[in-house]
Image (cartoon, helix red, strand yellow):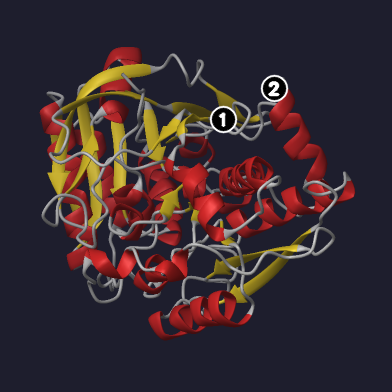
Amino acid sequence: MPRLRRSRAAETAAAVLLLLVGTACGSRLPQSDFEHDGRTNAPAPSSAAPIRVGIVTSATSPVGGDAFTGPRDGAKAWFDRLNAEGGVGGRPVEVRECDDGGSGVGNNTCVHRLIDEDKVVALVATTALDYAGASRVARAGVPDIGGQPIGAAYDTWPHLYGIYGSLAPRDGTPGWNGKLYGGTEVYRYFKREKGARTAAVVSYNQASSAAYARLVEQGLKAEGYKVVPEEVDFALPNFRAAAADLKQQGADLVFDAIDTHGNAQLCRAMDQVGAKVTAKVTNVQNWTSTVADDYKDSPRCRNALWATGSSRNYQDTGNAAVRRFRDATKGLRTHSQWQLEGWAAGMWFTDAAESCAREGITRACVDAFMNRSEGYTADGLLIPVTFERLAEPPQHRRTCLSVARWRDGRGWVSQGDMNSTCFDVPQLPYRP
């Protein structure tokens, strides 16, 4: 049985939930729209012509300039290194970028430009706050490889291949009848490895924040935790009161449904009231080298930060594939897990293109490779990724995860091997 991890869509969305009012994936289309001959082939280029790919990023979104650029930077670093080494069969990869500004209108504009005007073979490492153009990508039969599942698009449309895989039918409806499913492996991990029994969940009194908090609480309760909900006012948050209460309640873990700035304030308040926890758990988007600056006022909480994900720790330089990534990105100001996943997305496209080099690197050929992807690891950087189209949602899955802990002076320290840190866990439904 494939070792699949839970959907990270809800987890990633939580990092930007204050700006995600809803998922906008475009209008639903009949299946026949995905099967017309337009998807089969773009004109075959000459053998020396560049292979053109597109990268859509919400680089100037309302979230901030650096929030979504990690996957783009990682993918570009991969293609720069690839081209320096001769490209694909002697053909360089030409990257066409488009900043959608974090809006649905901008995203549709980027999709139109890259697909219809630039004639890209594929999209790579898409990181869009509002992936409104997803249905257009699917209708054109353009493979979208290794995108970040900020919304539900990668569990909705064919020809879209998120970085963590999917089990959903992807027939134009999110998940199964509008519901996605996620596992409880993160909560199981801390229960088994750290003996945690009580978990606080901090959220704002805001609809999206509260909805994600309920999802976390549901998973924690399924694993037998005592759950301590802590709601703070969005406009005037009293993090000190929340920190004092979670200390009083004896919380072992702290999860959150708040933004990065709020997390820094929460950590500072926890240090101020003397709240000592086993782990302050964050997600892959916050798995970055900027922790020392982001949490500079809260050393105790900072050193209790743990991150979980589905890719190998970008600081694991004992691994040859990670060393290659770090060598190629040594000129970047900061490093992050999202950069590594963008690098993996670029590698994934390259493997697909190389498989097509003899018959012609077309959209259809690259898409066929992606559709057959089973257990893809990007040279060991990803927990094996699979795409299936299950008619019914899974009730239980064996799921693996990557875990790291922040330590001052050392950065993110891996906790065990991601391919053996695995659990058979229930899959719980939620609406995106």
Whether 417 is drawn above or below 360: the answer is above
Q: Which one is in front, 228 or 428?
A: 428
Residue 52 figure quarter: bottom right
Residue 149 placed where, x, y %? 39, 54
Q: Residue at x 17, y 66 (%)?
A: 207
Image-based side of 57 in relation to 282, left or right: right
Whether 123 is drawn above or below 61: the answer is above
Q: What residue type is labelled 1?
A: Arg
Residue 10 placed where, x, y %? 29, 51
Q: Which one is in front, 275 or 380?
A: 380
**Screen quadrant of the C terminus:** bottom left
Image-based side of 214 in relation to 342, left or right: left
- How many callouts does the rendering have? 2
Q: What residue type is labelled 2?
A: Asn
Residue 233 placed where, x, y %? 22, 66
Q: Residue at x 37, y 39 (%)?
A: 387
**Screen quadrant of the N terminus:** top left
Q: Can I make out residue 78 in this image?
A: yes
Q: Mark 1 and mark 2 in contact (Cβ < 8 Å)?
A: yes
Q: Is mark 1 on a helix, strand or loop?
A: loop
Residue at the spot of label 1:
312
Image-based side of 260 in relation to 394, left or right: right
Q: Which one is in front, 13 or 124?
A: 124
Q: Which residue is drawn at 37% across and 70% down?
A: 139
Q: Which mark is residue 204?
A: none
Please report whichever mark, 2 or 1, sits nearer to the chain's N-terminal start: 1
Residue at the spot of label 2:
319
Residue 133 placed where, x, y %? 40, 74
The residues bearing labels 2 and 1 have C-alpha atoms spaced at a distance of 9 Å
Residue 282 figure quarter: top left
Q: Which one is in front, 248 or 397?
A: 397
